[in-house]
Image (cartoon, rainbow, N blue to C red):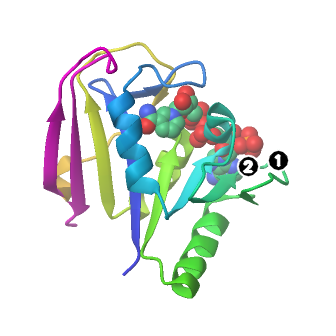
Amino acid sequence: MITISHVVALSVNKVIGVDNNLPWNLKTDLSHFKEYTTNKIIIMGRKTFESIGRPLPNRINYVVSNTIDKIEGASVFKNTNDAIDSAKNLCTKEDLDEIVIIGGGFLFRDTLSITNKLVLTKVDCDIDGDVFYPDFNLGEWRELDSKSFLKDSENDYNFIVSTYERIT
Ligand SMILES: NC(=O)c1ccc[n+]([C@@H]2O[C@H](COP(=O)([O-])OP(=O)(O)OC[C@H]3O[C@@H](n4cnc5c(N)ncnc54)[C@H](OP(=O)(O)O)[C@@H]3O)[C@@H](O)[C@H]2O)c1
């Protein structure tokens, strides 16, 4: 079975972004993101791509956009379904088993219903922002593992990285 996952960092009040950027510096979480996504297909919205500023190395980059046709180093799709279909075909062809949705708010909303794994970085803050992770029912998910990290000079807040699999 192909896993379709969300990898996202969210505050207590579900903020994920502000001014097309991340609302925090969490260096350790960025390392976790890099490690988790390396050698996988990553799908992102156009604004997240612009916020990152380049295709991420050692990953197969898919971008969903109606306003951009071509990006060097990434495949561009007019809608989320086309991106998912292509990613599934590539998984079969290349013997890959996971497609990772990396944001932002549009993409997470578009794909939550077809996602069977969540990798959540729960950031211990209530913060202002303009992009939110969608509401979801934790009753539909089972926690597989969880690891806590403490605020330090390279990480603005305490945070917990928890992995869930869908049970319904
Ligand atoms: N905390 C985290 O883990 C995390 C992760 C990723 C991003 N973020 C943050 O999230 C924010 C960006 O999120 P966002 O919601 O504003 O934008 P987004 O989801 O990254 O991108 C939205 C754009 O993607 C395209 N798109 C999305 N769904 C589409 C669909 N169904 N059909 C066609 N095109 C579609 C459209 O591009 P066009 O306008 O070109 O058509 C749309 O304007 C930033 O602040 C970023 O830093 C946070």
Residue behind label 2 places its C-beta within 8 angstroms of ligand 1: yes
User: Residue 133's spot in the image, x, y percent?
Assistant: 41, 37
Label 2 sits on residue: 65
For the residue pair 144 and 132, the one nearer the viewer reads as 144
Q: Quadrant of residue 58?
A: bottom right
User: Residue 53's spot in the image, x, y percent?
Assistant: 68, 35
Give the magenta range.
Answer: 142-168
For the residue pair 35 and 49, the one nearer the viewer reads as 35
Rendering quadrant holding ligand 1: top right
Picture residue at 21% right of the left edge, 46% below the top = 162
Picture residue at 61% right of the left edge, 38% below the top = 48
Q: Quadrant of residue 26?
A: top left
Tag of residue 68: 1
Disc 1 secondary structure class: loop
Q: Residues within 10 Å of mark 2 (few under 14, many from 20)?
A: some
Residue contact at pointers 1 and 2, CB within 8 angstroms:
yes
